[in-house]
Amino acid sequence: MMGGEAPELSAQERAGKAFPVSWDQFHRDCRALTWRLNEVGPFHAVIAITRGGLVPAAIVARELGVRVIDTVCIASYDHNKQGELQVLKGISEAAMKLGGGTGKGLLIVDDLVDTGKTGKLVREMLPDAHFATVYAKPKGRPLVDTYITEVSQDTWIFFPWDTALSYHPPLRDGAA
């Protein structure tokens, strides 16, 4: 750290608000997303943005009766710190063909759109696809066609696959 520079904070440290989501709540939110998507489809395939989009994509594909599921693997977070985007695996040629090369009739699914960097990259790959997320933050919200819950930009969502049940002290004992 040089002179008067502030130390770099992780996304979680910058996030002032915690939003824990249980498995039950996440499943309900994914089904609610599917109700909205059912009005928009049909879709030829679901493209999950990994890793966060895997669980909602499975639920949405099941509920919509879509059998073709592909992934686009993009790394943007290292635990809780956002970094440069890396495409680890692109969309398959077969899925691209189903979408006519532009994504028409394809459904992109992710758990969350945050800053929109990942969404923008996937939108460039599939400009005509329908993009759906379970949760949306204001910076990324304009990239998404369908979502269920908007949270503030300073909210940190704790997804059920990233958490475990543990003892939590009472508020009177200093718990946050």
Image (tube, grey):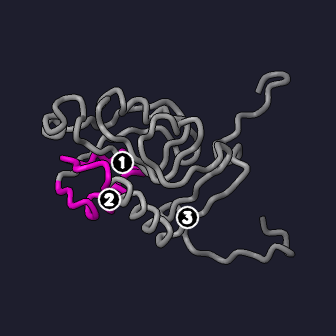
Q: Which residue is mark 1?
A: 109
Q: Which residue is mark 2?
A: 60
Q: Quadrant of the N terminus?
A: top right
- Give the CA distance from mark 3 to mark 1: 18 Å
> Residue, x 18% and y 52% (percent of image)?
68
Q: Quadrant of residue 119?
A: top left
Task: Residue 164: give its label.
Answer: none
Label 3 Cα crowd, 10 Å radius (few <14 / some 14-19 / many 20+): some
Q: Amino acid at mark 1?
A: Val
Total numbered labels placed on residues in the image: 3
Q: Quadrant of residue 2?
A: top right
Front of the two marks 2 and 3: 2
Q: Amino acid at mark 2?
A: Val
* Mark 2 vs 3, N-terminal side: 3
Residue found at the far front of this picture: 39
**Element class at badge 3:** loop
Task: Residue 21: give its label.
Answer: 3
Residue 102 percent across, percent down from the top left: 23, 29
> Residue, x 57% and y 74% (percent of image)?
165
* Mark 3 vs 1, N-terminal side: 3
Residue 62 percent across, percent down from the top left: 26, 63
